[in-house]
Image (spheres, rainbow, N blue to C red):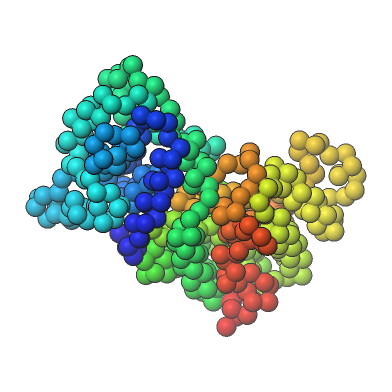
Amino acid sequence: MKYSPISNQLFIKNRAKFTAQMKSKSIAIFNSNDVFTTGADSTLPFEQHRDIFYLSGADQEESILLLFPDAINPNHREILFLTETNKHIAIWYGAKYSKEEASNVSGIKTIYWLSEFDKVFYDLMTEAETVYFNTNEHYRQSEELESREDRFIKKCKSTFPAHKWEKSNQILQQLRGIKEPEEIDLIQTACNITNNGFRRILPFVKPGIMEYEIEAEFMHEFLKSRSDGFAYTPIIASGYSACVLHYIENNKDCKDGDMLLLDVGAKYANYSSDMTRTIPVNGRFSDRQKAIYNAVLRVKNEATKMLSPGVLWAEYQKEVGKIMSSELLDLKLIDKADVKNEDPNWPAYKKYFMHGTSHHMGLDTHDYGQLKLPMKAGMVFTVEPGIYIPEENMGIRVEDDVVVQENGLPINLMKNIPIEVEEIESLMNS
């Protein structure tokens, strides 16, 4: 891993919070992600399953976490299973965790090799009544491949049909949605690295530059700052491409007079940042570009003020819509008749601002977190309004990452990233 070691106290706290909500005589199992092949003998870079990382800090393939708070043997209340390392693995792929290293990373005293899992698990299941399975129930999940978790669940249900089943995800949605201070520090580090990348490209951008050259500059800055790279596939969208919300080709040239939308975030220690800035390719906003940009910025600032404990996400979105409608009226993109006759299910402002304003962020860019229940202190949200005008070849979005506070305004983790028109122009022309 490129990132600095994380104190195992974070993972000890996370496990304690999870096990406190487990039923009596229950076991919870968490599997690492698969390693995916690309053909022949090549594989994609490994990405650890965020749930097992959240609970153990183990950042290694073929790992299994077992939690059994009521185990008769105290040594079996927390177990981490790992692939046994050897000289061959060390020479060809690099050494894996030793038992001592795994214990230091996770704070778990009992470390077994993966080859011992079936025997130990069978023995513990004779004491247990319920198994918590770790299914993916994120509201945006789209799984087409069978995962290690899926295969484990099939095998477990077949081998132990008399046991009861529960879901880990309902607990994790609640826990992962509220960040510990250590987690906010890690997200802040990711945001700081993103700031470095943005400041790097501001004087670099000019007419004729290719979108992928800008992407490369970001990657250079991210990697040299101990980032794992991009937290998600970056959007480097100039001109009309900024009106395509998930444009990721990044293969066009940036033209004089166009705006350039940059939806980019660094990842650090598996934690995401998520930034959007929109800048003029030639380094100077036109009057029209400035008017629309500042309208979006005002919506972002007002929306941020609304994020506080007790707020419902759906009601928050409605209120942001009202602010955006006012800005669009001032810009003459919609008129009063449009608002008066609008469909309540698709308000007039949706013609130019068709996506949500905020989502949870953390270990995943679209992180776990309950959207149907009131917001709580410690939640981390993006704030990302935009105005998209295809007929003008222009899409403008700004986005910051903020932490909801018990009292007062949210803390903006991206407060040091340039966002005002004057600062952007100054840095682009320095």
Q: Is residue 132 left or right of residue 422?
A: left
Name the outermost residue toward the left: 87
Quadrant of the image occupied by residue 28: top left
For the N terminus, give its image quadrant. Answer: bottom left
Vertically, is 255 above or below 131?
below
Q: Residue 143: percent from the left, percent from the top?
A: 44, 34
Answer left or right for 426 relative to 69: right
Report x, y in % for residue 119.
18, 30
Q: Depth check: give the residue in front, 139 or 232.
A: 139
Is residue 369 at least partly visible in the picture? yes
In the image, residue 33 sits, relative to residue 191, either above or below, namely: above
Q: Nearer the viewer, residue 416 or 288?
A: 416
Measuring 74% from the left and 65% from the top, which residue is drawn there? 294
Task: Judge left or right: residue 353 versus residue 52.
Answer: right
Q: Residue furthest top?
A: 162
Q: Position of residue 331 (x, y in %)?
A: 82, 59
Tell me the residue at 40%/40% (across/down).
19
Q: Quadrant of the C terminus?
A: bottom right
Say if residue 350 shows up in the picture: no
**Between 390 and 346, the one nearer to me in the picture:** 346
Task: Tell me if residue 3 comes above or below residue 159 in the rendering.
Answer: below
Q: Residue at x 17, y 35 (%)?
A: 116
* Image position, residue 277 (x, y; %): 60, 63
How many tags in the picture? 0
From this viewpoint, which residue is outermost toward the bottom? 430
